[in-house]
Image (spheres, rainbow, N blue to C red):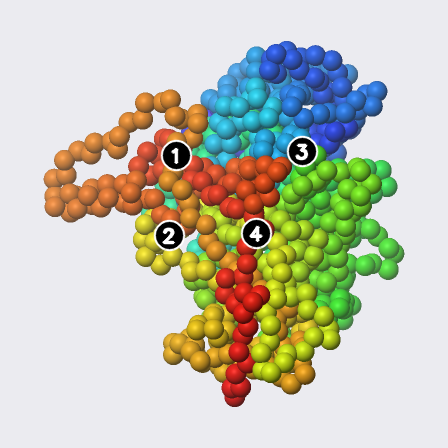
Amino acid sequence: MLLSKKGYPLPLSARIEQLPLILAGPTLRQTKNNSVTVWIALRAPREVTLKVYATASNGTVIQELLLKGSHSTVPLGKYLHIVAVTAESIDHYQLTSGQLYAYDLSFGDQEENLAQALNTANPNTQSQYPITVSYFPHQLPTFAMPPSDLNDLRLAHGSCRKLHGCGQDALPLLDDLIKYHADQPNSRLHQLFLTGDQIYADDVAEPLLWLATEAGDTLLGWEENLPLQQISATGYEYKKPGELKPGQRSDIAQHYGGFTAMLLDSPEEAKSHLLSLGEYLSVYLLCWSPILWPDIFAQGKEVYQDSQRAQQWDKQVCQLQDCLSGLWKVRRALANVTTYTVFDDHDISDDWYMNCAWCNSVLGKPLGRRVVQNGLLAYAVFQAWGNTPEQFQQGQPGENLLKAATIWSNSGGTDQSASVAIAKCLGLPQFEPGTGLPKLKFDQGVFVLDRDYPDGTAYLKWHYTLRSLKHEVVVLDTRTWRGYPQGQQGEIAPPMLLSPTAFEQQIREPLELTDQLKQNGDSAIEVTLVVVPTNMVSLQIIDLVQQQQLEKGNVFDSDVGDAWNLNKTAFSRMLAELFKGRQRVVVLSGDIHFGGAVRLNYWHNPRSENSQPQSGVLPVRFQNSGTLAQLTASAFKNSEFKTHLIHTKLKSLALEPPQDWVGWNKPPQLVEIQVVQGRVQSLDLALPTTGPVVRQIPRSRGNLDVAWKILPKDSNSLPDWQYHVEWIKRQKAAFAPWKEQEILSTIPQQKKPVTWLGRATNLVSILWRNPWVQEGEEVVGHSNFGLISFVWPQNNEAAKAVIQDLYWQPPWQPNSVVYSRYFVSLSLDTVPSSLPSVEQSVSATNCST
């Protein structure tokens, strides 16, 4: 153990030369049948060679070399060299399903292999955690390609991992899952999707920021000048990262950066915002690998004289150390499963691009622009490079970004032309010369950030689509392609999470390309998954709170701009685009710190333009269009008391009722409805002026006697489409397969309390941890991840279904692991439950507005 003379942990600058060559990784990233990409971060520059091998005897025996490729590391700093190296097929070999493959890495002329590089530390330094990335004696990572039968496909997903967040870290549990099925290619995990908030840049524990600041400066080999404000026509006031201490950054972030991160509802959690490039880079390394962590932290009383701050420091140290104990398992898991990611707001900063007001506030300030650029650059090299390595090939925007980042770092952060090039490649918007505010451009009725520079610089696309043998995954960018509306609410109006152009590029074009591949016989895809970082359907209480906050103009303390259904145009377009091309859609989402499942059935009205209602009666002839399953897994590590509460039986007292909505295409509009005694009722929402008109009755007074009014000769008064939402109940928790054979102890016996208060507290604790209390009916509110599988009979369309197993650690047995199952039917054999059937009709009843 390395200690300084005073008992403080040695800074990274004093330890860096003694650390292993590999600082983080390897992480298995994009895999195709003819190429494999692996990401890795090194302490020194190397030419990295990736080799992929066939295996035999259930993965235990390494056989012939199949794929090979090399790539030099990119020097982001003196001690930080990163590469995503791709191995390509030898002799046109194609990786197939049902097989286990292994890979190895070598580093330069010494031909040092992966196992050796993992253990190249100074022999005087010994890690207290296992150093391995393999489940086999040969010590190589392994993986399996997606199967040819959807019944065998295994996908995992999760989001929101804050190292000092509440609850136990669920990401290490993935390692247990992979290990249990390691020698079974059709049973082990095939793909992992991290759906947002892989780091929390705006909510950093003070000990973590203290470590990240020093580590960042050491890794880069220089200290960044952060521009606080402009003090002359050409000059700025600068601060070094080390001058902006942990726990003292709220005012800096708000006044000089324009950030809104939790400053309204939780200002105590926004005191340590990441600002510098080095801080962003080092936090990724600290989240994914144990290598940079010191063996000890200073005690709170040695850091602060204030006892309250000292206690808070010690509490956060304990939370971080608890998370640190599982990082070796996180590292091994990420090395052995194909991993894809997408950002959400906390990867950069809370409320990132949420609305026009945020864009103007943050991007309109020098520090705000720099922080967004630093965060997005870190995301590009740590996450996006592995998602779409083809964007980082020669002549592509990613390669241009890496070149500019190298120049920027070599100059110690002083080369402004390199900084401008970085901003362009990242797709940061242009700025108005007079105001310094970000430029906007018009996109079919809304405004989007203008990233089309006059010199034609191409920028990275953060969305992408994956296609395997039987499934496709469309990963959406709902942050940088938002459509900001005009209207009375101005800059805080809820945006379209995808602008019209984004709908075309991110959904319609990928789905049409898949259809073309199928027509040409080049694809046999049967199911479509869509990764949407923010939920399309949420709990009613969340919708109600957000609507109230929007009416008050308080949008930043409850993520109002991130709700799909607050912008009716966007939500209507989303459903229309998905069901225009697919009958079955599975949405993977996170963000909200609890997990669950929702089924949405969708119908459309294929009436002809010439049809007209007759005799005051309008036939209802909706046709089945499709079924959508929204599967939510959140958080890996950031549960809260309120999520623990709704996890329990208490939520069963107010279960989510089924909902029925109707919508129109022109103008786009959504209206919640009910059917009471043969009449269709609106639930207190404005309807299109060209369509049905209903009496507006407040919810508190009920919604009786409200029906359609059919306008004369108006064939468009009937809704264009309808959908029905139902929350799926979770099944009783079962022990994870790797825990089934263990002898499980009961709740530890407590010592007899000496006071009545102690007895009462002990009783409440036992009751709270009781399995019956914890078996709520709808959501999982403890740290979790989701495992996705399918029931897919070829000759029974009605029996097709998707299953989500949410893995979590139960309060009644904290050292164990259970899973709660959600079974979601994807059957198309359903009819609208809230509208009369085809043989019936809705009576047209005149009513005043």
Residue at the far bottom in the pictured view: 848
Q: CA distance from mark 3 to mark 4?
A: 38 Å
Q: CA distance from mark 3 to mark 1?
A: 31 Å
| Foreground: disc 3 or disc 4 | 4
Q: Is residue 41 among what the camera can see?
A: no
| Foreground: disc 4 or disc 2 | 4
Q: Quadrant of residue 492?
A: bottom right
Residue occupied by mark 4: 829
Q: Is residue 265 above or below residue 812?
A: below
Dot 3, how many residues are within 10 Å of its Cα: few (below 14), some (14-19), or many (20+)? many
Dot 1, how many residues are within 10 Å of its Cα: few (below 14), some (14-19), or many (20+)? some
Q: Secondary structure at mark 4?
A: loop
- Name the N-terminal-most of marks 4 and 2: 2
Q: Position of residue 584 (x, y in %)?
A: 62, 49
- Name the N-terminal-most of marks 3 and 1: 3
| Residue drawn at (70%, 12%) of the image | 63
Residue occupied by mark 3: 29
| Residue drawn at (40%, 42%) of the image | 731
Residue occupied by mark 1: 734
- Name the N-terminal-most of marks 3 and 2: 3
| Foreground: disc 3 or disc 2 | 2
Mark 1 residue type: Ala
Mark 3 residue type: Arg
The disc placed on residue 646 is 2
Q: CA distance from mark 3 to mark 2?
A: 35 Å
